Image (cartoon, rainbow, N blue to C red):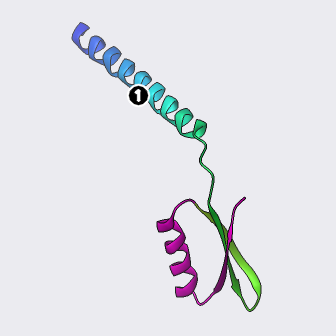
């Protein structure tokens, strides 16, 4: 039974450490100065349907494609 308790304690220790590492990684991501470069707005019959930020060229192109495939017109504005 001691071996079982030892392994259980080891596993719980691993879980705590893993949670701590994930929390630290999340904080590092939050600390980065990541700002969107553009905002894309999709319209249907001149009525706004959705607006999303784009952080890089690939994401911008993906949002443009999604708007076009859905039959929306769209505008892209740089974020200041």
Of residues 57 and 8, the one drawn nearer to the viewer in this rendering = 57
Name which residue lies at 41% across and 22% down.
17
Of residues 20 and 64, the one drawn nearer to the viewer in this rendering = 64
Name which residue lies at 46% across and 33% down.
22
Name which residue lies at 68% across and 74% down.
50
| For residue 39, side relative to residue 25 (left or right) | right
Q: Quadrant of the C terminus?
A: bottom right
Secondary structure type for disc 1: helix
The mark tally for this picture is 1
| For residue 1, side relative to residue 66 (left or right) | left
* Residue 12 vertical placement versus 22 (above, below): above
* Residue 65 vertical placement versus 71 (above, below): above
Q: Quadrant of the N terminus?
A: top left
Instruction: Point out the stretch of residues depicted in magenta.
Output: 55-80
**For mark 1, what is the residue?**
18
Give residue 63's quadrant in the image.
bottom right
Tell me where residue 11 appears, x and y as whole percent: 33, 22
Dot 1: few (<14), some (14–19), or many (≥20) neighbours within 10 Å? few
Tell me where residue 16 appears, x and y as whole percent: 44, 22
| For residue 12, side relative to residue 27 (left or right) | left
Residue 69 among magenta residues: yes
Q: Residue furthest right?
A: 47
Of residues 37 and 23, the one drawn nearer to the viewer in this rendering = 37
Tell me where residue 58 appears, x and y as whole percent: 47, 67
Of residues 35 and 1, the one drawn nearer to the viewer in this rendering = 35
């Amino acid at each position: 039974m001691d071996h079982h308790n030892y392994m259980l304690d080891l596993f719980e220790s691993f879980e705590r450490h893993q949670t701590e590492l994930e929390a630290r990684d999340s904080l590092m991501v939050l600390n980065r100065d990541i700002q969107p470069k553009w905002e894309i707005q999709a319209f249907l019959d001149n009525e706004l349907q959705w607006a999303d930020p784009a952080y890089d060229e690939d994401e911008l192109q993906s949002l443009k494609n999604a708007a076009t495939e859905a039959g929306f017109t769209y505008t892209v504005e740089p974020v200041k």
